[in-house]
Image (tube, helix red, strand yellow):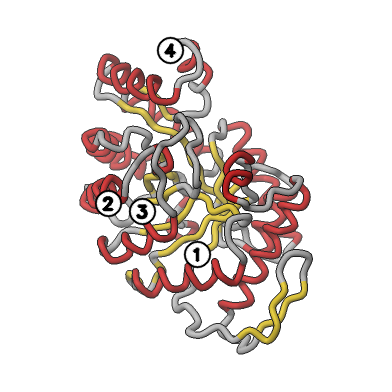
Amino acid sequence: MIGAEQMPFSITLEPQEGETYQDVLAVARRVEALGFAGLYRSDHYAPVWGGEGLASTDAWATLAGLARDTERITIGTMVSPVTFRPAANLAKVIATVGQMAGAVDGRTRVHVGLGTGWLEAEHTMFGFPFDDLGARFRRLEEHLRVLRGLWDPGTPRFSFDGEFEQLKEAVFAAKPDPVPRVVLGGSGRRRSAGLAARYADEMNTPFPTPASFRALRAALDEACAAAGRDPIPLTVTAVCVIGADEAEFRRRAERLHVRIGDRPFDEWLEQRSDTWALGTPERVLEHLTGLIEAGAAGFSLQHLLPDDLDMLDLLAESVADRLEEIRPEATAPDRAV
C-alpha cells in the first residue's frame, strides 16, 4: 500500500468513452484501497477517441456520488471546461460536492481542475459556447475570479461585471470550508502559467517531456514572482500502461490500441514513448524520474483500461511505492499537492 507521506500520486479516468458510474466507482474503491492520493475524471459530454454513441456521464454528478461512496481520496476534475457551466453555478456545485465529501486532516477532498475547453464538436452538439481561443481564455479568467470571490469568507456579498459573467450582490452561503483546491490545467508558458500564478493553488500540465516540463516550471515560477506569490506546485498528467514484463505490457498496450489507436500499433506506440509512461515498471519509473528531476510535484496517471484493476495493483506496488526513494527536496511535503 502506498505510504500516506509519499508524493501525490493519483489516477485519472476518461469516462466519456463508455464507462458507467459503477465502472468509475470500482476504480475509485481500488484506488482508495491501494493508498493512491486521489481519483480525477475528465469532463466531457462526448467521446474523445471512441466512436459515436458511446455512453458518458456528467462529471460533477459522478463526483457527488464518489463523495459519499469513498472516504479518504481526493476527487476532482482534470479538467472542467469553463464553457460548460456558468461560474456561479459551478461554484455552488463544487461547494456542494465538497460538503458531501467532507475533509481529511483539515484538507479539502475536492479539487477542481479548470481549462478553456477544446473539443468543438461536443460544444456544437450540446449548445455550449465555443468562441475563439482568446475569448475562451478570458472566460477562464472570469470563472477563476468568480469562484475565488464567491468562496472568499471575507466577502459577504460579491459583485462582478465581466464580459461573460455578471453577478450583483451575490450572497454565497454556506462558504465552503475548507475551500476546494483550484487546479489550472494547461501547458502555455504565458497565458496558462499567468492565470495559474494569479488564481490557482496548482498547475497541471498534460503529456510533457522533461525538457518541456522544465521550461514550463521556469515560466510558472517567473509568473508567481510577478504575482507576488511563492511558487505553486506543477504536476503532470500522463497516460500510463504498465506490465510486469514486456509481454504483459504489450498485451495491455494492444488492448488500448484497439480502443483508441489511430495508426499501426508499433508506430502508434513509438509516437507516444516520450510523453506517456509506458512499459515495464523500470521503464515507467525512468520516465517519471525524469519529470521529478525536472521539478514535478505529483502525478495523475490516466488509466485508459478501467476494467483492468490488476494494472492498478502493479502500479502501486512497483512504481508508486518506489517514487519516494528518488524524490528530491524540491518536491518534498511542503510543496505537496
User: How would you rate the neighbour count of disc 4 (Cα within 10 Å): few for under 14, some for 14-19, many for 20 or more?
Assistant: some
**Residue 55 located left or right of residue 234:** left
- Which residue position holds label 1? 181
- Which residue position holds label 3? 38
* First along the sequence among labels 3 and 4: 3
* First along the sequence among labels 4 and 2: 2
Tell me the mark number nearer the camera, choosing from 1 and 2: 2
- Which residue position holds label 2? 25
* First along the sequence among labels 1 and 4: 1
Q: CA distance from mark 4 to mark 2?
A: 30 Å
User: How would you rate the neighbour count of disc 3 (Cα within 10 Å): few for under 14, some for 14-19, many for 20 or more?
Assistant: many
Q: CA distance from mark 1 to mark 3?
A: 13 Å
The image quadrant of residue 88 is: bottom right
User: How would you rate the neighbour count of disc 2 (Cα within 10 Å): few for under 14, some for 14-19, many for 20 or more?
Assistant: some
Q: Position of residue 224 (x, y in %)?
A: 69, 58
Q: CA distance from mark 1 to mark 4?
A: 39 Å
Q: CA distance from mark 2 to mark 3?
A: 13 Å
Residue drawn where x is 68% and y is 86% of the image? 169
- Which residue position holds label 4? 265
Reply above or below: 241 against 248.
below
Tell me the mark number nearer the camera, choosing from 2 and 3: 2
What's under tag 1, amino acid-wise?
Answer: Arg
What's under tag 2, amino acid-wise?
Answer: Leu
What's under tag 4, amino acid-wise?
Answer: Phe
